Amino acid sequence: MSTYSVRSGDTLSAIASRYGTTVNNLARANGISNPNLIHAGQKLTIPGASGASAPQAGGSSYTVKSGDTLSGIAQRFGTTVGALAQTNGISNPNRINVGQKLTLPGGSGPSAPAPTPSQQGQSYTVKSGDTLSGIAQRFGTTVGALAQANGISNPNRINVGQRLTIPGDRFEPAPTPGGPGPVTGPGPVPGNGQGGVSLQQLRAIMPNLSQAKAEAYLPHLNRAMAEAGINTPQRKAAFLAQLAHESGEFRYMEEIASGAAYEGRADLGNTQPGDGVRFKGRGPIQLTGRSNYRAAGRALGIDLENNPTRAADPDVGFRTAAWFWNSRNLNTYADAGNFREVTRRINGGYNGLASREAYYNRALSVLR
């Protein structure tokens, strides 16, 4: 068995996916009673694994696991999405399959582990597919610390080639003074900063969600919440309540209607024939319209404008929901307990408010 040292931003589900095991196996092997509570620096025993704590490439190749993305693999092995795609003849970098064997360009090995505090204070150049949350996790810091150190007002907007200063110490962004209102940077992160929900909590909040679907969706949901800083009971309750209502407890990851009603909607960026159907609502928060697909894709490093159906896939759909959440500064309103304003900013009004509030109150009771 090998060990792994938990880094800032890690979740047990993400670690389990990385090592080809399960959350339950990891929790059992390490005596963890609450799989949502792990701490930076905590040493985990990886059941059934051997060798160093970093994932092995198997020489110059890598076998795709559930939850992998090409950008994530590229970052892990110190290469780029373009180089991986070219080496493996991949025409659509958003489509890779579990079990697919990838050749790593240039004999790349796993990227170096996160630097120690004495190594920090260095710089990093943004590569294609990078996200600020991914960079923060790689260097053992936080999105807020990176944003503050580099004067980034919108953590969903970083550019390829941009040089980032890696802060020498981990720190949380300062609370926003005053009452709720739009903010330009990441919101406060109260509490212990641990994200995610357990399988039992998710099914208690969404009682009509099947065990199988909950197990399939949970890693993607938790990864998206961690990426977006949805990491306190108030934030998680508000986010899950909205998703539960919008998707019928994850029953619908694509709008039932054809989308023809959105044809010609310039306010949604639907300016070309067929855009209404092409960019109809997808994902658990029903991302809709060419302009929203374009903006979400740019923020996440995924070409959703040319591959819109990817927004219905759970590995992307939950991330688009989290992107939409942050693009409307909804953590700020969730922190203030202003669920009505959260609803207005998602729905454009208060349609289904009673249903949303029922999910919200149930989620609060489950998560507190």
Image: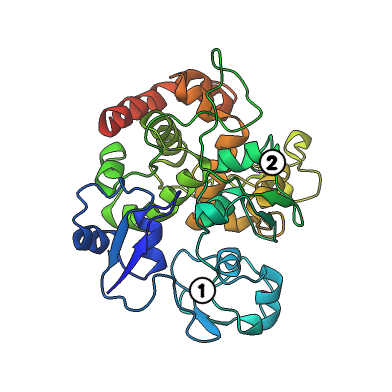
Residue sitting at 55 percent across and 12 percent down?
Answer: 178
Quadrant assignment, res 105: bottom right
The mark tally for this picture is 2
Query: Where 188 falls versus 231 (above or below)?
Result: above
For label 1, the SS is loop
For label 2, the SS is helix
Residue sitting at 41 percent across and 46 percent down?
Answer: 250
Which numbered disc flags the more N-terminal residue, 1 or 2? 1
On the rendered structure, is 283 left or right of 127? left
Using the image as rendered, state which of residue 64 and residue 276 is in the foreground: 64
Using the image as rendered, state which of residue 78 and residue 365 is in the foreground: 78
Residue 159 picture location, percent across and down: 74, 51
Residue that protrudes farthest toward the bottom in the picture? 59
On the rendered structure, is 262 left or right of 211? right
Quadrant assignment, res 27: bottom left
Dot 1 crowding, Cα within 10 Å, few <14, some 14–19, many 20+: some
Residue 123 picture location, percent across and down: 68, 54
Q: Amino acid at mark 2?
A: Asn
State which quarter of the image contains the N terminus: bottom left
Residue 71 picture location, percent across and down: 61, 64
Residue that label 2 marks? 150
Residue 190 visible in image: yes
Quadrant assignment, res 287: top right
Residue that label 1 marks? 97
Residue 4 is marked as none
Using the image as rendered, state which of residue 149 and residue 184 is in the foreground: 149
Q: Are marks 1 and 2 in contact (CB under 8 Å)?
A: no
Residue 239 picture location, percent across and down: 45, 34
Residue 312 visible in image: no
